Amino acid sequence: MSDLATLFAGLVRHHVATPICPLPNPGVGITWIWAANGVYKRGVSSELDLMIPVGISWPAPGLASLLPHVRYKQWPQRLPGALLSPLLEDARQAATGDTILRPIEKQYFFVWRDGVRVVAPRGQDASAVHLRYTMPQSGPVLLDLHSHHGMDAYFSATDDRDDVGLSVSAVIGKIYTRPTIRCRLNVYGNRWNIPARLVFDELGPFEDGGTDASTHD
């Protein structure tokens, strides 16, 4: 077996979820899990442990049912929702124009720096419909979030192209009238929308945008 094949074999595992052992010990890489309620894909890195359903499975007696999960190595609980209110107020101030101000999108990251912090990259190239930015230079990223100002909270085709690794993403929309947030887990090419309360301990000024199945793949 080549060195590359050996490395790949060590990063991809398979597991059958039983009541005695529904999940294996987390190991860096991907684990495909056959459960009573479908096939799940679990991605683990040095900072994140995410699991999402990716397909149906043939019903077999004796298997355990599973649920999607998000776990942080540095922060063993949900993210503090108290950080969402000041983030919303900052997003409402994001605008461009000399005489007539126009709302623009803005990018934020929840990072670990001896606690959970929210940072906004400097020098963002943003408009009402696009956003370019640099990643934070320090601190593991726990979640990335961007604003959609007056539009709905939804993940675009550009987001789908970007979210190909292992990450937790959120988008906020209707920030001036009815602030809404939507969250999803990205596991190496597959994505799954989840209730925002699985990520945050409270939603503050936001309503949950739901888990529209049309964006799951």
Image (cartoon, grey):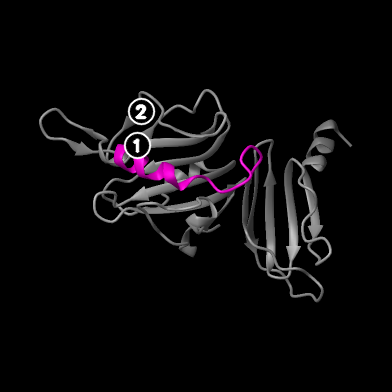
Q: With respect to residue 67, does 175 lie above or below?
A: above
What's the residue type where badge 2 is placed? Answer: Gln
Badge 1 element = loop
User: Which residue is at the front of the view, 57 or 194?
Assistant: 194
Magenta-drawn segment? 72-90
Q: With respect to residue 60, does 43 lie above or below?
A: above
Q: Which mark is residue 106?
A: 1
Residue 137 location (% of width, % of height):
52, 23
Q: Which mark is residue 48?
A: none
* Badge 2: residue crowd in 10 Å (few <14, some 14–19, many ≥20): some
Residue 74 location (% of width, % of height):
63, 37
What's the residue type where badge 1 is placed? Answer: Lys
Which label's residue is closer to the chain start, 2 or 1? 1
Residue 156 location (% of width, % of height):
41, 49
Residue 147 location (% of width, % of height):
35, 43
At 68% from the left edge and 39% from the top edge, which residue is drawn? 45
Left or right side of 186 for 8: right
User: Are the residues at dot 2 and dot 1 in contact (C-beta closer than 8 Å)?
Assistant: yes
Q: Quadrant of the N terminus?
A: top right
Is 81 inside the magenta-drawn segment? yes
Badge 2 element = loop
At 39% from the left edge and 51% from the top edge, which residue is drawn? 204
At 80% from the left edge and 67% from the top edge, which residue is drawn? 19
Alpha carbons under labels 2 and 1: distance apart: 8 Å
Query: Residue at label 2?
Result: 124
